[in-house]
Image (spheres, helix red, strand yellow):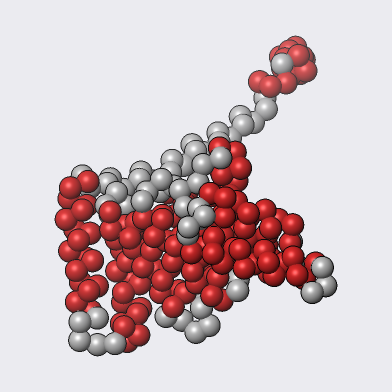
Amino acid sequence: MRYLLCALAAALLFPWGCATAPKKEPPEAKPPEAAKRLPPKEQEALALQTFTEILELTADVPKRQVLAQMQELYWKIIREYPDSYYAKESYWRLIIIHLEDFQPPRIQRAMELYREFLQKYPRHPVRLAIEDTMVRFFYKAKLWKELLEIVNPVVREFVRTGELKGPFFLFLYAEAKRALGELEEAEKGYRHVIGLFPSSTEAKISRRRLKGLKESSSGG
């Protein structure tokens, strides 16, 4: 009896002594190790080899017949040789394919690739070629929203610093604003083009645009 009372007292005073031990949490799973990158020189050589394969694909057959294979190889370069020059050019080539080789053009996919490129290689010179290709396509297709996404950063930088390397993007900005009915902003753009690059083709067209805007506002 005394033993039973002692056991009961122990259980009341130290309840954890009789409780079931908590289960241990399983160890946190570690993420898989990132694949090791090849040295830059090796990436460059292998990327060039793959790029040559793509060129050979179109040597004897129309591009459309091997479009899927071309895209696969461009993606191989991007995934496996990201430090090579050809990874950057592969983004450009894929964007061209989506804009020019599909009907209707895959606008959203081209924009996704452009944004992905900017995240990975924001300062690489191939960016200029990509943006030139895209804005010319968007201007011709009258896709003003997409065009402005590309030219707006250039215009904002111009407003901030007063520096502009050429008239083209500012002119396209003014054209987009005119098409969207934002005439005051368009006029500002045209006037800056004329003031900064007076002998350019863009300035010549800008003068005509300003004349047209003036005649429209005066009812002429």
> Would residue 77 appear left or right of 161 to someone viewing this image?
left
Across and down, in percent, residue 115 comes to 51, 56
Residue at the image position 53 percent from the left and 49 percent from the top:
196
> Would residue 20 appear left or right of 10 to someone viewing this image?
left
Residue at the image position 34 percent from the left and 63 percent from the top:
90
> Would residue 103 appear left or right of 146 to someone viewing this image?
left
Across and down, in percent, residue 64 comes to 35, 85
Q: Which one is in front, 127 or 156?
A: 156
Residue farthest right in this picture? 219
Q: Is residue 202 above or below residue 188?
A: below
Q: Is residue 104 above or below residue 130?
A: below
Q: Is residue 184 above or below residue 133?
A: above
Count of marks, rendered view: 0
> Would residue 19 appear left or right of 194 to someone viewing this image?
right
The image quadrant where one finds the N terminus is top right
The image quadrant where one finds the C terminus is bottom right
Residue at the image position 27 percent from the left and 46 percent from the top:
37
Q: Which one is in front, 100 or 74?
A: 100
Q: Which one is in front, 203 or 189?
A: 203
Residue at the image position 44 percent from the left and 78 percent from the top:
100
Across and down, in percent, residue 66 comes to 30, 82
Residue 144 makes an appearance in the image: no
Residue 104 makes an appearance in the image: yes
